Amino acid sequence: MHKLLIRNGSVYSSEFSRFLTKDLLIEDGKISKIGLGLVDSEARLIDASGLIVAPGLIDMHCHAYPLKPLPSNALNPIDPDATCFSSGVTTIVDAGTSGWRDFITFKEQVIEKSAVRILAFLNISCRGMLDLEAENEVDMLNPEIVASYIKSFPELLVGVKTAHYWTTKPFDDLHPMWASVDAALEAGELAGKRVMVDFYPNLPDRTYPDMLKRLRPGDIHTHMYAPQFEIIEKGGTVAPFIWEARERGVLFDVGHGGISFVFRNAVPAVKAGHIPETISSDLYTKNIMGPVFSLLEVMNKFLNIGLSLERVLYNVTAAPAKLIGRPELGVLKVGSPADVTLLAMRHEPCSFIDGGDARLDGDKKLECRLTISGGKIVFNPYGLGCIPWEKAPEEYWTKQCQIMY
Ligand SMILES: [Zn+2]
């Protein structure tokens, strides 16, 4: 495999949450050297002056299964390789699109075929989101089987997901109030893994504070700024039950999605310190043209709400890497997989939209300039490291094509 030498970039250190000007040498799919003034005559040089060099971004909440043709009642997923690299994302965590019944097909047809690294939360409902109605049925929940799958594929399955259960109709004997959340917690306990909860209060009986009380330390509530949660009190303070949940170690993920992120909740919450542990997109086909667009766009929303660049980067690198038990993916250090993204910070008037069609005006925006996955350049719209076409002999062009593609 060829070598890449990234020079003079502002390298983000997720361990110390700061930037240092350094060079990075990449060979055999790994970072082999980090230092100042690195030289290697065999390496392709990439001048990263003025750019941020960060670990490949990790999207903690995406949907990447099934393939086409789509079942009629399924969530419409993204194609990870076509979607993620252009925003610097090299790893995604599928948030329960698949249940245990379809996991092997998901693994063989998508996970093992994708250049983007895919890990997954397994849906507590056996049909996952291939049949959104089935997530309402108690006989589709089997914690023992879910736990056994997670134990059998520890390199791919990072936890259990519960979502979309009995959100509006009255509860009855066939649909107990907490059936899905409790089954997911039981599976999480049996497998020794986290649970990620997508939740809709069914009032007056099933409330958001009561759901948070059920979660264990380390479990994750995704869609934390969705409009169905009354987290902001009069005067702009955050409701006490949120701080109580945080005190107990409950974690919060953005999971922007089509309708699960509103500035009305996010802006005052961030200002009051109710900040996500992980920033994620919840990308599927229907929100990719807005309001989500990409993980990078979601990160830009948080930058313009007022979160620091260091914190935003931490929330899409080291933070998710630790939560999924793959800490080597969230740092740039010698021996780590060479998943790297080069970002430019543009200072210019810009605007962003949320899931309620409301707008936030801002003045800064990250743009992805280059993505490297496993030591290979996979996105390079500005031609970094390329020579001007007038100076490129034909054999050079052919060779570069072979290297890149
Ligand atoms: Zn989702």
Image (cartoon, grey):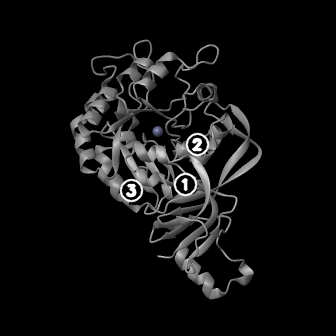
**First reached walking from the N terminus: tag 1 or tag 3:** 1
**Residue at point 56% right, 37% down?**
258
Q: Is residue 12 left or right of residue 80?
A: right
Amino acid carrying mark 3 in the image? Ile
Q: Position of residue 130 (x, y in %)?
A: 38, 42
Which of the labelled discs sits on residue 369, or is there none?
A: none
Instruction: Classify 372 as above or below 389.
Output: above
Q: Is residue 338 or residue 132 the one in the foreground?
A: 338
Q: Which residue is pictured at 31% across the width and 16% down the height?
A: 172
Name the residue beneath numbered marker 2: 312
Q: Earlier in the sequence, mark 2 or mark 3?
A: 3
Q: Residues within 10 Å of mark 1 (few under 14, many from 20)?
A: some
> Disc 2, ligand 1: is the CB inside 8 Å?
no
Could you tell me which residue is drawn at 49 percent across and 47 percent down? Answer: 59
Q: Is residue 162 above or below residue 299?
A: above
Does residue 273 appear anywhere in the picture?
Answer: yes
Q: CB atoms at circles 1 and 3 under 8 Å apart?
A: no
Crowding near pointer 2: few (<14 within 10 Å), some, many (20+)?
many
Q: What SS does tag 2 mark?
A: helix
Respond yes or no on whether mark 3 lies under 8 Å from ligand 1. Answer: no
> Residue beneath label 1, please?
83
- In the displayed structure image, the side of residue 226 where residue 187 appears, left or right: left
Above/below status of 281 relative to 332: above
Query: Compared with residue 140, is residue 169 higher up or lower down, i.e. above or below?
Result: above
**Closer to the N terminus: mark 1 or mark 2?**
1
- Residue 158 place in picture, x, y as percent: 35, 45
Q: Which quadrant of the view contains residue 148? A: top left
Q: Which residue is mark 3?
A: 111
